[in-house]
Amino acid sequence: SQELEQSPQSLIVQEGKNLTINCTSSKTLYGLYWYKQKYGEGLIFLMMLQKGGEEKSHEKITAKLDEKKQQSSLHITASQPSHAGIYLCGAGTQGGSEKLVFGKGTKLTVNP
Amino acid sequence: DGGITQSPKYLFRKEGQNVTLSCEQNLNHDAMYWYRQDPGQGLRLIYYSQIVNDFQKGDIAEGYSVSREKKESFPLTVTSAQKNPTAFYLCASTDRGQGAAGANVLTFGAGSRLTVL
């Protein structure tokens, strides 16, 4: 079965710093999804990537999917306390299955 | 506003009791899912349903049961057979018709936290 490895597991940064979270799979990714979760709450959809080399941005968050479609990165520019939370990547399985698998998440703390 | 409502938010259960977590959506989505989240383990799929009156086991279905009698409702029962039920449970849904294959953006509820006493 497909597994997603996220790194780092946790990250503490000073407000204003840039940071990157990675999501890696040993298999080709069919749809890569980034979500954000506040502790004890549901997941909020951030972005979806489908094509190799694709890059999307929303406000200060940029997500990329590599050409081989096996690795994605989430980059936050000039981090703010509002960016704090758990970031999870999820991916579809081959054939367009509606079962998504998720990484274990990256906990981000932004110190003011 | 459209969305997914999970209830209760917090639930305490004694060992040996069955409990049912509610999940209701008004998004007219065909597919619904139940995930379990434990610290350090991410989300694991319990059950999912792509259409009314049909559902499939996920990766950790043992000790759980579901029903899908209505499109908008997908309740999860945590039975006494589930050995370690204390966890955060998340319900999600998606519209099967949107986008290309693999383009399944899940909408999540706010979650239910179950604690076994």
Image (cartoon, rainbow, N blue to C red):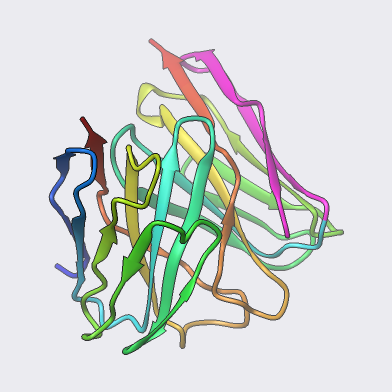
Query: What residue is rendered at 56% in x and 59% in y?
Result: B59
Look at the image and give the residue range highlighted in magenta.
A1-26
Query: What residue is rendered at 46% in x and 61% in y?
Result: B61
Query: Which quarter of the picture shows residue B99?
Result: bottom right
From what the image shows, is residue A42 above or below residue A6? Answer: below
Lateral position of residue B46 relative to residue B110, left or right: right
Task: Please state the horizontal and vertical placement of residue B69, each as a whole percent of the image.
Answer: 23, 85
Task: Please state the horizontal and vertical placement of residue A51, each as a whole percent of the image.
Answer: 73, 68
Say which quadrant the N terminus of chain B sits in. Answer: bottom left
Query: Which quarter of the picture shows residue B14?
Result: top left
Towards the viewer: B51 or A76: B51
Q: Main secondary structure of the magenta part?
A: strand
Task: Please state the horizontal and vertical placement of residue B13, each as a whole percent of the image.
Answer: 17, 40
Residue A22 inside the magenta-drawn segment: yes
Query: What residue is rendered at 39% in x and 56% in y?
Result: B63
Query: What residue is rendered at 56% in x and 19% in y?
Result: A11
Lateral position of residue B10 relative to residue A30, left or right: left
Towards the viewer: A18 or A25: A25
Towards the viewer: A2 or A16: A2
* Residue at the outermost right position: A68
Residue B62 inside the magenta-drawn segment: no
Towards the viewer: B111 or B116: B116
From what the image shows, is residue B22 above or below residue B97? Answer: above
Task: Please state the horizontal and vertical placement of residue B96, each as a whole percent of the image.
Answer: 46, 84
